[in-house]
Image: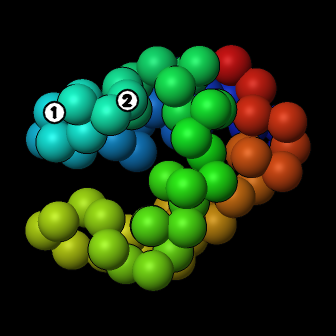
Amino acid sequence: MELSFAADIRPLFRDRDRNAMLGMFDLWSVDDVREHAESIHAVLARGAMPCDGAWPPERTALLRRWIDGGAQA
């Protein structure tokens, strides 16, 4: 199954996540998330983001699959 940013990845990021990161990039922009995908994934995998609690492993794995699958819009 091919993942898309619009359907599978964008919904993972909440308003508060986006607002917290807007000074560096926009989590609702496929281009920004593609550009920073590896660093976003690394921080999420370490459990350092979001600030109010780590993502469950299946969310981090979904992001990894999207990246590895070519980060489709």
Q: x, y (%) of residue 49?
A: 31, 65
Looking at the image, which is closer to me, 3 or 72?
Answer: 72
Label 1: element kind: helix
- Considering only vertical position in the picture, is 51 above or below 21? below
Three-letter code for the amino acid on which mark 2 is drawn: Phe
Q: x, y (%) of residue 65?
A: 76, 55
Residue at 25% across / 39% down in the picture?
21
- Considering only vertical position in the picture, is 9 above or below 63? above
Q: Which residue is mark 2?
A: 25
Q: Which residue is mark 1?
A: 19
Q: x, y (%) of residue 66?
A: 73, 45
Q: From the viewer's perspective, tell me whether residue 40 is left or right of residue 22.
A: right
Residue 39 lies in quadrant: bottom right
For disc 2, the neighbor class at 10 Å (few under 14, some 14 to 19, many from 20) is some
**How far apart are labels 1 and 2 at the CA level?**
10 Å
Label 2: element kind: loop
